[in-house]
Amino acid sequence: MSTDTPSAADQLLLDHAHRRGYDDVTVKMLEVWRSRRLLPGNVAGGGLGRGRGSTSRPAPESFALLLGLARHGGRGKRPHVVALLLFGEGLPVPTQTVRAAFTAAVDTLTVPGDDEPDADPEQRLDALADRIAGASLTVTLVPARARRIDEGIARLVRAAGHTWPPAELAALDANPRPPTITPKDAALAAAAAAISGTMSLEDIGDLLRAMNPTAVANPIASLAETTRKDVPEFADAVLTDDSQLALGPVRDARDHLRDLAATAPLQDLARAWKTAEGVRQWALDLCGRVEEEIAAGQLGEAAVEWMNGRYAMAGLAVLSTLKERDRPPAQHALDALVLLYQLGEYRRLDRLVPGCQWHFLATEGLMPPPTRELLQDLISQNAPSAGAGVDVRAAS
């Protein structure tokens, strides 16, 4: 029952908060935070004893959590959001609360038809295609800021009388063609991948080309499109019979993320959270640096990094970052889960296909630098020095 008179243990917590300037923390707030499993209860034993008050004491982690809650746990704040903010600061949020918050983040990923989970998958996809065709459901393939950077670089390259990409890069595309996928097509492909946990190699290639629409050649898209022909043994190990890339066992991709939220060690979740934040900061910093070079009329190291990454996962991370101007904590949690998911798939692939040349993941521009750090144990397995990307400075 609520009381305005704090126990001796709660008084210790209130004094701790008040001494640090959080004078508005009350007994009622402690009760609310405990009911939401954001703050642990007091531990029996200790206190004043001998009839002079409570014999309970605050859990050791309560003091740090209390200050975090005073910063983030104001009126109207959703408990899952508060839990993620505290977790992101490295505070000792109760384990089940952290897992519930990550699971709630996955639940924000909704697809039309989720309210009919027992529907036949093929019928559901047909209905979804009809709905997308008749509605304004689309996916932003290239955010405006990325388009402006692409156009600025292309303008400087043309002004110098050069072409991009260079011939040696263009020669690596076995199927050079302009993108044909539309934003509505992309929305359907993304929804289908969420529902089935698979994506065709053709869709992967189409999406990669559509996300770099000014490129006359896209070697990474070509690698995806020609997997079955170029490396049949590898393809047999990782593709379904109908040439779909399966993201683990064939099922709703969101179920894979929920499994991670429920089972991944907290230290892995924390490391992925930190990596996701590092990727975002790297992407925003890269945009700022390359914009400065464009404004100065001289392409430099930032443009090299931008153009090399534009064809690979590093560039996809930039596009994803630019789609979320103010990333909410739930999106940050999703980014962290996806990173863990990717890492797990790399390890699964390493078991399925021994001898993978993981050192190529260290190639400049292929992956965001923070993600490369997360994969260092794989990269260093058989690593000669990784090659550098193509330098565009000579074309400016």
Image (tube, rainbow, N blue to C red):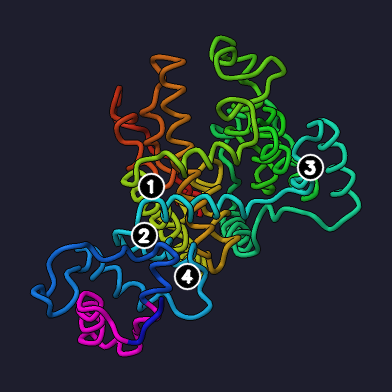
Q: Residue at x 32, y 43 (%)?
A: 373
Q: Nearer the viewer, residue 51 or 254?
A: 51
Q: Of tags 3 and 4, which is closer to the observer?
A: 3
Element on which disc 2 rests: helix
Look at the picture and state if 139 lies above or below 9: above
Q: Earlier in the sequence, mark 1 or mark 3?
A: 3
Q: Is residue 20 magenta?
A: yes
Q: Earlier in the sequence, mark 3 or mark 4?
A: 3
Residue at mark 1: 269
Q: CA distance from mark 4 to mark 2?
A: 41 Å
Name, please, the residue furthest toward the left: 50
Q: Tell me where residue 91 sits by quadrant.
A: bottom left
Start-end of magenta stretch: 5-29
Amino acid at circle 1 = Leu
Image vertical order of residue 227 relative to residue 202, above or below: above
Compute the Cα span from label 3 to label 4.
55 Å
Q: In this figure, which residue is indicated by the disc labeled 2?
A: 87
The residues bearing labels 1 and 3 have C-alpha atoms spaced at a distance of 31 Å
- Place of residue 114 in the rendered image (x, y in percent of width and height, measured from the top left): 74, 46
303 shown above or below 210: below
